[in-house]
Image (spheres, rainbow, N blue to C red):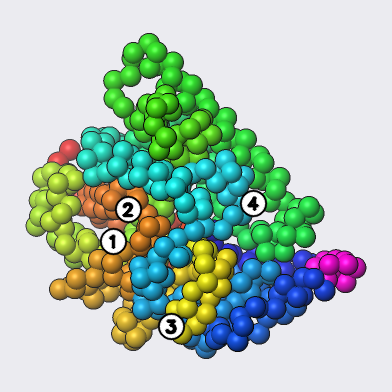
């Protein structure tokens, strides 16, 4: 869970002060706030206020606020978020210690009200505490659902969805209509993932995209009750009510889909196996003690992780890539030239072409550097006391890796860190897959994203196809410098506003 600070601070601060003043547990909580370090050196950090700690310093864009604080206090910085001790990591060297060298110590997740409510008691993979069950779920997803062979098997689905999108955009181009790129990219990626995981085209009975967006919004929302538990019963932010409503919608949708798969299997009319079919085969297997799909709630939690992790993350990064291309016409033109040279102007891009598009790879890397989809990764929790960089970090501390700050560190990327310049990766061995800690948008180690390969294929295919088929310009005489790049913070860092552009078809093929 990321930690966006919602605009509740002032009333909550007043209520917190009032409740603590009247509460008989005030002294007990104050004693809990005092770190028990036995004289060992803690990471430096800003002074903490009584009760709220450093919550007031997070701001509306915590990744930026934490970057500013790290410039003053260093790449290993301590904070206190209400009653929760936290450590913020802001350098590749420190990130390597957390994500690789001492990975096992930092491999657990905090339990939050959102993860408990939305993930069937944290029975999925993303928010589950580290242990045997999590390892079995991870193994299942990695080997049976998200392996390279499984991703390749669903290639025809991705091709079909993308060709439908191209035809739709061609009609808009012929009519000289402005296209809502955010909506169009969202539709094509949702269609790909929906068919891969659930085995059918978009279903009007369920607003899958809307449900997923609400799920991620709640998972990333700052719930003050996670940091000041005594406020939980008041539900001041209304998050408990939203969690209950969203959880009910999720369960109804997944239960309907699972039942329909069971009925089709009984009638033997299932032609192709999707992710639901694979998980159902595990649900029916009772002879394997290592089987993580013990019951329907386990299955639903895993499905929700897969759907949530695949749809909005791929949409978000695709839209940031497209935004930077529109903002930087030089880069757009250079990418189109590469596509023309590699693919030609008489055919559509195919997935087999992607491995030869080296400049596209650089564009994707540069986008992840400036716009990591999960800027603070998912938080970890220390499972035991540990010392890194000479600093003592005690058990059950929240650990936040600010990959957004690392991506804009001039010590790593030179002084033009704000510039979108894909050529910085030319002749570079820096990779996205979790071994180069100056660029780890998917995390690393045990908790690295298992769906990375699927996500990269989807994003590269969508961007390559749309840039190859169409010339794009901003509408209403908007200059590239005027393009709105405002961020909206949550579990994912998305565009605050929809991206609009005017296409014109440019291939010599109908």
Whichever of callouts 2 and 3 sits on the residue coming sooner in the sequence is 3
Mark 1 and mark 4: span between their CA atoms? 30 Å
Evaluate whether residue 29 shows in this view: yes
- In the image, residue 196 lies at what x, y percent? 34, 35
Chain-order first, disc 3 or disc 1:
3
CA gap between label 4 and label 3 equals 32 Å
Q: Residue 454, percent across and down?
A: 30, 47
- Rendered image quadrant of residue 28: bottom right
Q: Position of residue 92 (x, y in %)?
A: 36, 76
Q: Which residues are magenta?
A: 14-26
Query: Neighbour class for label 3 at 10 Å: few (<14), some, many (≥20)?
Result: few
**Among numbered discs 2 and 1, the one appearing first in the sequence:** 1
* Residue that numbered label 2 is attached to: 452
Residue named by callout 1: 433
Kindly identify the residue that appears in the image at 43 percent across and 19 percent down: 262
Cβ–Cβ under 8 Å for marks 2 and 3: no
Where does the image place residue 360, in percent across and percent down from the top left?
Answer: 22, 60
Circle nearer the N terminus (4, 3): 4
Quadrant containing the C terminus in the rendered view: top left
Q: Quarter-wise, where is residue 283 in the image? A: top left
The secondary element bearing badge 2 is classed as helix
Secondary element at tag 4? helix
Is residue 238 shown left or right of residue 129?
A: right
Q: Residue furthest top?
A: 267
**Residue at (27%, 74%) from the top-left corner?**
421
- What residue is disc 3 on? 389
Label 2 environment density (alpha carbons within 10 Å; few <14, some 14–19, many ≥20): some
Give the quadrant of the N terminus. Answer: bottom right
Mark nearer the viewer, 2 or 3 = 3
Q: What secondary structure is found at the residue carrying circle 1?
A: loop
Q: CA distance from mark 3 to mark 1?
A: 25 Å
């Amino acid at each position: 869970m990321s930690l966006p600070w919602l605009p509740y601070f002032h009333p909550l601060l007043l209520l917190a002060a009032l409740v603590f003043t009247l509460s008989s547990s005030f002294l007990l909580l104050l004693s809990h706030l005092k770190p028990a370090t036995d004289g060992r050196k803690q990471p430096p950090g800003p002074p903490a206020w009584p009760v709220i700690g450093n919550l007031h310093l997070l701001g509306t864009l915590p990744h930026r606020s934490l970057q500013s604080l790290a410039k003053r206090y260093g790449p290993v910085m301590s904070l206190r978020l209400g009653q929760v001790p936290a450590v913020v990591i802001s350098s590749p060297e420190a990130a390597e210690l957390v994500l690789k060298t001492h990975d096992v110590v930092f491999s657990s997740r905090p339990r939050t009200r959102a993860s408990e409510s939305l993930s069937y008691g944290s029975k999925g993979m993303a928010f589950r505490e580290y242990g045997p069950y999590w390892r079995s779920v991870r193994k299942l997803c990695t080997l049976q659902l998200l392996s390279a062979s499984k991703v390749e098997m669903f290639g025809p689905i991705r091709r079909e969805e993308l060709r439908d999108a191209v035809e739709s955009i061609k009609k808009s181009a012929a009519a000289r209509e402005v296209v809502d790129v955010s909506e169009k990219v969202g539709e094509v990626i949702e269609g790909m993932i929906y068919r891969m995981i659930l085995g059918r085209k978009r279903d009007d009975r369920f607003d899958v995209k809307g449900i997923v967006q609400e799920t991620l919004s709640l998972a990333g929302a700052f719930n003050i009750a996670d940091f000041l538990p005594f406020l939980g019963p008041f539900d001041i932010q209304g998050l408990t009510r939203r969690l209950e409503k969203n959880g009910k919608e999720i369960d109804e949708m997944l239960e309907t889909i699972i039942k329909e798969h069971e009925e089709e299997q009984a009638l033997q009319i299932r032609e192709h196996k999707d992710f639901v079919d694979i998980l159902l085969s595990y649900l029916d297997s009772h002879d394997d003690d290592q089987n993580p799909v013990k019951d329907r709630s386990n299955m639903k939690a895993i499905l929700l992780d897969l759907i949530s992790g695949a749809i909005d993350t791929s949409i978000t990064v695709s839209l940031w890539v497209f935004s930077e291309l529109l903002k930087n016409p030089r880069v757009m033109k250079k990418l189109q030239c590469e596509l023309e040279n590699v693919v030609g102007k008489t055919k559509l891009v195919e997935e087999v072409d992607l491995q030869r598009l080296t400049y596209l790879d650089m564009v994707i890397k540069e986008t992840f550097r400036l716009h990591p989809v999960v800027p603070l990764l998912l938080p970890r929790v220390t499972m035991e006391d540990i010392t890194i960089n000479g600093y003592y970090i005690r058990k059950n501390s929240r650990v936040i890796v600010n990959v957004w700050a690392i991506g804009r560190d001039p010590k790593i990327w030179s002084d033009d860190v704000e510039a979108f310049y894909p050529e910085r990766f030319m002749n570079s061995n820096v990779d996205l897959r979790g071994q180069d800690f100056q660029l780890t948008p998917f995390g690393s180690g045990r908790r690295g994203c298992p769906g990375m390969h699927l996500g990269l294929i989807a994003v590269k295919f969508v961007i390559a196809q749309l840039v190859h088929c169409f010339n794009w310009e901003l509408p209403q005489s908007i200059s590239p410098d005027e393009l709105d790049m405002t961020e909206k913070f949550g579990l994912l860092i998305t565009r605050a506003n929809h991206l609009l552009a005017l296409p014109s078809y440019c291939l010599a093929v109908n």
